Image (cartoon, rainbow, N blue to C red):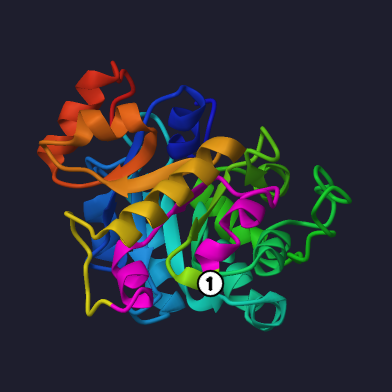
Amino acid sequence: MARINRAIELLEQGQPVYYTGVGDLSYDGGRAEAGTHADYLLVEMEHGLFNLTALEAFMRGLADEGPTRSGHPTPPVIVTLPTDGTDEHVMRANAWMVKQVLARGVHGILLCHAETPDAVRVFVESARYPFQTVGVGSGLGVGRRGAGGQGWAASVWGISPEAYLRRADVWPLNPEGEILLGLKIENRRALAHVEDTLRVPGIGFAEWGPGDMSMSFGHLFHHDPPYPPELEDARSRVLGACKATGVAFLNMVQVEDVTRMIDEGVRIGAGPREAIEIGRRYTGRVMPV
């Protein structure tokens, strides 16, 4: 096993990654999801309960039922936070959320409404230990994650606390890192800064959030295509910024469009299992799940 985080391993191989949401956030739910067909699991805490006790139990269930068929200790878990990336001050005040979920042993975080580069910089710094210095002084300050939470997280990852401290850094900024950070560029304020935001070191993926983006443009709710021109333009701008910075672009995929999405540049997808299987065959996927 070269990697703890198989989503990162697949992205390094040039393979698209597919995720699914978690319904039962409990120990038994973790055991049930250990054999998921997806490449990573998304725990939704933006609108769902910010329940760290349930998250910890879920992660323990995953670990106890592991390893996965791909040989990894657990499927990767990425969590959305209830805070928004409004600005530096909001993100600094809520950095405790980043530290708390990482201490539960998760493998990544998706920051919603990532509106400013300064907020994203604080987000990345909050996920890093201060001795990890790649990128410090070149767009980032010193990491702010502290000692004390590594023991539990290490047990979930199946490694020693010392090994966890070395490997719990952000990828691809640190090529040896196992933590995947993502952004939702999902309103007009975020869209206005997307090119600068995605240049912040330490971000691995981004999405354009059509539901919230449509509301930001004055629509009641317009999550699924076909989209009006202003939403198509917003999506194109986020996709272009991802390509320019090497950040993986996330988008929904369907049976009828998954191969086109891959050709367009989508590297992280969510959709029905049939669409995922079509995508894996299309790209010659080898790694089992």
Residue range of the region highlighted in magenta in the rendering? 190-218
Q: Quadrant of residue 264?
A: top left
Q: Is residue 75 above or below residue 217?
A: above
Q: Is residue 226 visible?
A: yes
Left or right relative to 228: residue 176: right
| Disc 1 residue crowd, few under 14, some 14–19, many 20+, Cα 10 Å | some
Name the one closer to the observer, 133 or 208: 208
Going by the numbered disc 1, the residue's amino acid type is Arg
Give how far across and how far down residue 63 sits, in percent. 40, 50
**Residue found 24% across the figure and 43% down from its top:** 35
Q: Quadrant of residue 279?
A: top left
**Given the current orientation, which residue lies at the most extreme right position?**
137
Q: Is residue 69 visible?
A: no
Would residue 116 be counted in the magenta stretch? no
**Residue found 51% across the figure and 58% down from its top:** 183
Name the one closer to the observer, 36 or 174: 174
Would residue 199 be counted in the magenta stretch? yes
Left or right relative to 265: residue 260: left
The residue pinned by badge 1 equals 189
Q: Is residue 206 above or below residue 240?
A: below
